[in-house]
Every structure is written in C-alpha cells, then in structure tokens.
Image: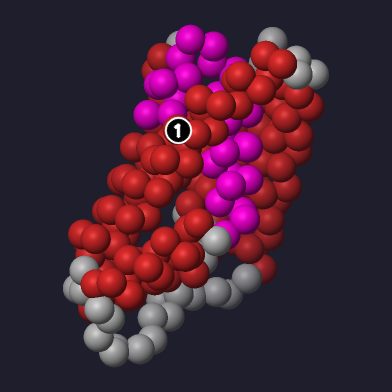
Amino acid sequence: MMSAAFSTGFGIGLSLILAIGAQNAFVLRQGIKREHVLAVVLTCALSDVVLIALGVSSFSRVVALLPWLDPVMRYGGALFLLWFGAKSMRAALCANDSLVVEGEATTSLRRAVLTCLALTWFNPHVYLDTVVFMGSISTRFAGAEIAFASGAMSASLLFFFTLGYGARWLRPLFARPMAWKLLDAAVALLMWGIAVRLIVAP
C-alpha cells in the first residue's frame, strides 16, 4: 500500500506540473541564464509542498463530515484525468508548440522570488490541482496518506530542480516541437491509467 500510494502520488504530481506554463517557462529561463536558480526552484517546490500538505491533511477531515464528497470527487477526478489526458494526447497529435526563452535582462533575487510566488499562489489552477484534486485522491490510500503526499512532493522537488539546473541542456531539446509531442503523449497515457485505477478502486 505504501509503495502504491507513493508511486501514485509521484505520478500524478509529476504529470500535473509537466505542461508548458508561465511558472515552468520562468524557471527554465532563470536556469538558462543561471540566475538565482536555487532560490527559484526552492520557492516553487516548497510552495507545492505546502499546498500538497494542506490538501492531503485537510481533505480527509472534510470527507469525514461529508461522506458523499469522496465518491463525487473520486469520479470527478477520474473524469478530469480523462479530459486532461485527452487534451495532452490532442496536443501530442496536433500541436506544434515549442518552449522559447526570450530576454536576457538580469533579474534581481527579490524580483525572481516574488515572481515565483505570484506565478504559484495567484494561479487558481494550483489550488485545484494540489488542495482539491490531490487531497481527494489521497483519501483512496487510508493510512498511507503521508506516503502519497511524499510521492507528490518528491515529484515536485525532482521536477523543479531538474528543470532549473538542467535548463541549459533542455533548451535545445524542447525547442523542437517533437519533444513536447512525445512528452504530451506520455502524460496522456499516465493520466488515463490513473483514471482507470480511480474508477475501478473499491
């Protein structure tokens, strides 16, 4: 149970932050420029850690008061994963996106950290992904919520540190649309697999 909870948390956590977005683009840009990389990745990752902990620790208490909420969120979460997977697969088949990093102006440490905080805490999708979505899935692992949260937190730490410090090698790779197509396809398959597990879970 512990290993299943950890691996599920890791897989979902990684999938939810893989998409090209403003936060990831900023981390990548800072990594390429080698400016305040440690502060930037720590700000992003620790913000995720706090939000995941909040979702996993509080959602189960809410479910105890409202037992009907668990199946609603479980099947709702499965539908979301199916939709997200379809969106990712559509991007893999149709889109020609690439991540272009522009601008070489120096960014101060204060501005870099504040930008990370704004991109994280002012984004409503972050709360949906971490507090509501991750919190609801964690209830499927009664007694192993800490393992589930640890998996999701580990995914966030791994992703942001890899993105920040590996940016100078990732830039030429993800300047190619095919790289994003393969990544989107992998995310789609992973999301669909987790959705099936949610639906067939007892």
Q: Coloured how? A: secondary structure
Q: Residue sitting at 41 percent across and 21 percent down?
A: 146
Question: Could you tell me the amino acid type at mark 1?
Answer: Ala
Q: How many numbered tags mark residues here?
A: 1
Q: Residues within 10 Å of mark 1 (few under 14, many from 20)?
A: many
- Please say whether residue 182 is visible from this viewpoint: no
- Please say if 28 is above or below 59: below
Q: Quadrant of the C terminus?
A: top right
- Please say if 155 is above or below 68: below
- The residues colored magenta run 123-150
Q: Residue sitting at 45 percent across and 75 percent down?
A: 99
Q: Residue sitting at 38 percent across and 86 percent down?
A: 102
- Please say if 158 is above or below 64: below
* Most foreground residue, 161 or 187: 161
Whether residue 49 is in magenta: the answer is: no
Q: Residue 25's quadrant in the figure?
A: bottom left
Q: Residue 172's quadrant in the figure?
A: bottom left
Dot 1 falls on a residue whose secondary structure is: helix
Left of 159 or right of it: where is 74?
right
Name the residue carrying label 1.
53
For the stretch drawn in magenta, what is the main secondary structure? helix
* Most foreground residue, 155 or 50: 50
**Residue 114 in the image, given as x and y percentages of width and height:** 37, 68
- Please say whether residue 21 is visible from this viewpoint: yes
Whether residue 138 is in magenta: the answer is: yes
**Residue 188 in the image, given as x and y percentages of width and height:** 60, 47
**Residue 44 in the image, given as x and y percentages of width and height:** 37, 55
Q: Residue sitting at 63 percent across and 37 percent down?
A: 132
**Residue 86 in the image, given as x and y percentages of width and height:** 70, 51
